[in-house]
């Protein structure tokens, strides 16, 4: 492995300042650097120092003056120790570099990898590091090269999550890429799960790749679909949403593909279908898991050739649409049960974005609750805050209805709370604490509560689905899928 800094042999006196053992003050000891680079040096000294010890180092560079910097002991040997410099400011770095240049052995050997180059070169024949030490830009180029090498060396210790964190940090904080895209303005939260979603939106939006968005009800699937369209080259064209669960089966074909006048009873005029309307833009197929098998075949045919054939016509028209689909169903188990076509799944699932449920985004719970409290307080021109108990209740609740449930509970609390402090009761979160020993499994508990609430809501709303959706704080399609799930 090559070095990432040029090292030169020197004999430079240095004063080492360290806390003395009794901790009573600082002692100053005289030693000397026997080698130096921009990132550290080796100090000859007859007593060993503990690794990681931080020392003050004071040295006088001939012709450049006195410097005082911090160094950390990285390796201790019999005759001295290696130290890494901390926070060398630009001026100190440039002067140190001048000094290193003056003391460098001038030959054709690459100081980074040791290769004997055949002639004087700008870059080493072997490792390609820049060797043009006397150019004005050398130090800037060198810093860039060594930065990349340091990152590459450390990347072996990164997990995929760490890499995303680094990339997100570079994109958003350093390059400001995310800022232009405003994703953070629509999506509230800072959990790693959500940051990964932002990163995927940014990556996939500019392409024409079909996207399948999965996740529980209320996690932000529709918001994600809109964010993708808004950040695509198709943003000035339509993004047509089709809710596969909301349109009756017998009408959905005409809705999607359009129909010719007189093609069926009630078709008084020729109508353009949603696919044709979305030409040049995007189609968002929401609740795709609810599509009947007959329509799944038609959709698949359309996806293969992108030709829309109106109901009752004998010709077709090619359209250019980007497909985004969403579902809260587990399509793989639907395939296993034979209710969803495998070939259609693979057409849709080219790029999958899975929205984690709120219970897996622990740190987002309070952030979201505070965000919506501010929002609704402003809208209603009131000033409200949460009590400590309310914050605890928000943190410990599972939020099965996800962000939508937070929105609804907070909105309700702003209206219901009698004074400016919002309590768990205002939020409807006075859930009795269960004994863990009587809990069979969280899944079972959630299952039975969800089912019970649905039965109660249906009864309370006289089976009016829109009302049920409002009361439970979920979408109408979600009510339909819950009814299917629990066979109610
Ligand atoms: N991270 C977030 N920050 C702010 N608002 C959010 C966030 N996620 C979702 N929302 C809001 O929560 C509500 C529900 O989100 P959305 O409709 O996108 O969920 P969904 O996954 O499509 O739900 P469903 O499966 O029930 O259709 C919307 O009002 C949306 O704007
Ligand atoms: Mg939705």
Image: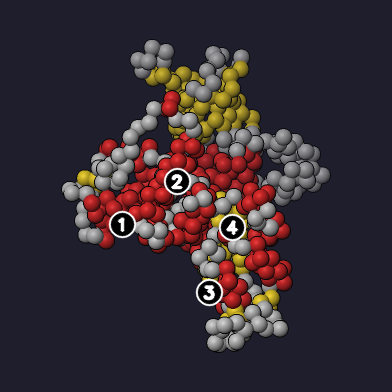
SS under mark 3: loop
Q: Is mark 1 within 8 Å of ligand 1?
A: no
Which one is earlier in the sequence, the residue at label 1 or at label 3? 3
Label 4 near ligand 1 (CB < 8 Å): no
Residue 337 circle label: none
Task: Give the CA distance from mark 3 to mark 4.
Answer: 23 Å
Write the residue at 30% across / 54% down: 411
- Residue contact between numbered discs 3 and 4, judged by CB atoms under 8 Å: no
- Residue appearing at x 29%, y 53% in the figure: 412
Say whether marks 4 and 1 touch (CB < 8 Å): no
Query: Disc 1 or disc 2, which is closer to the eye?
Result: 2
Q: Is label 1 in contact with label 2 (beta carbons under 8 Å)?
A: no
Residue 410 percent location from the top left of the image = 31, 51
Q: Which mark is residue 375?
A: 1
The disc placed on residue 451 is: 2
* Proximity of marks 2 and 4: CB atoms separated by less than 8 Å: no
Q: Earlier in the sequence, mark 3 or mark 4?
A: 3
Tag 3 near tag 2, CB within 8 Å: no
Q: CA distance from mark 1 to mark 2?
A: 31 Å
Query: Marks 4 and 1, how far apart in space?
Result: 33 Å
| Quadrant holding the N terminus | top right
Mark 2: is the Cβ under 8 angstroms from ligand 1? Answer: no
State the SS at label 4.
helix
Label whose residue precedes the other's in the sequence (2 or 4)? 4
């Amino acid at each position: 492995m090559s070095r990432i800094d040029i090292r030169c042999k020197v004999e430079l006196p240095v004063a080492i300042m360290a806390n003395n053992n009794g901790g009573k003050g600082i002692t100053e000891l005289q030693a000397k650097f026997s080698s130096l680079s921009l990132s550290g040096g080796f100090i000859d000294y007859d007593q060993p120092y503990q690794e990681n010890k931080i020392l003050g180092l004071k040295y006088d560079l001939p012709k450049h003056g006195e410097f005082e910097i911090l160094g950390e002991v990285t390796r201790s040997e019999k005759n001295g120790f290696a130290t890494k410099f901390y926070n060398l400011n630009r001026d100190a770095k440039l002067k140190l570099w001048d000094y290193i240049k003056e003391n460098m052995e001038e030959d054709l050997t690459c100081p980074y990898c040791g290769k004997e180059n055949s002639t004087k070169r700008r870059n080493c024949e072997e490792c390609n590091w820049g060797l043009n030490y006397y150019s004005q830009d050398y130090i800037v180029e060198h810093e860039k090269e060594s930065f990349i090498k340091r990152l590459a060396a450390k990347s072996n210790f990164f997990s995929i999550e760490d890499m995303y964190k680094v990339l997100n940090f570079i994109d958003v904080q350093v390059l400001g890429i995310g800022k232009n895209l405003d994703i953070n303005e629509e999506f509230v939260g800072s959990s790693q799960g959500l940051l990964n979603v932002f990163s995927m939106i940014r990556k996939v939006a500019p392409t024409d790749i079909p996207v399948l968005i999965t996740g529980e009800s209320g996690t932000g699937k529709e918001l994600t679909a809109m964010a993708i369209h808004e950040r695509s080259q198709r943003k000035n064209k339509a993004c047509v949403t089709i809710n596969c669960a909301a349109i009756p089966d017998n009408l959905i074909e005409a809705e999607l593909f359009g129909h010719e006048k007189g093609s069926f009873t009630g078709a008084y005029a020729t109508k353009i279908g949603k696919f044709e309307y979305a030409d040049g833009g995007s189609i968002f197929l929401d609740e795709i898991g609810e599509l009947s098998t007959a329509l799944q075949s038609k959709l698949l045919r359309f996806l293969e050739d992108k030709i829309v054939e109106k109901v009752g016509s004998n010709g077709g028209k090619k359209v250019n649409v980007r497909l985004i689909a969403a579902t809260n169903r587990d399509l793989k188990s639907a395939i296993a049960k034979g209710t969803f076509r495998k070939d259609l799944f693979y057409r849709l699932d080219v790029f999958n974005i899975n929205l984690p449920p709120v219970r897996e985004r622990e740190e987002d719970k309070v952030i979201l609750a505070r965000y919506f409290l501010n929002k609704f307080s402003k809208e209603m021109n009131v000033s409200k805050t949460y009590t400590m108990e309310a914050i605890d209740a928000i943190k410990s609740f599972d939020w099965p209805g996800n962000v939508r449930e937070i929105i609804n509970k907070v909105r309700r609390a702003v209206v219901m709370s009698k004074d400016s402090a919002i309590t768990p009761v205002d939020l409807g979160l006075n859930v009795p604490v269960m004994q863990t020993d009587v809990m069979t499994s969280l899944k079972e508990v959630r299952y039975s509560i969800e089912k019970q609430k649905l039965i109660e809501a249906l009864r309370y709303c006289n089976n009016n689905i829109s009302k049920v959706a409002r009361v439970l704080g979920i979408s109408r399609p979600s009510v339909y899928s819950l009814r299917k799930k629990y066979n109610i």
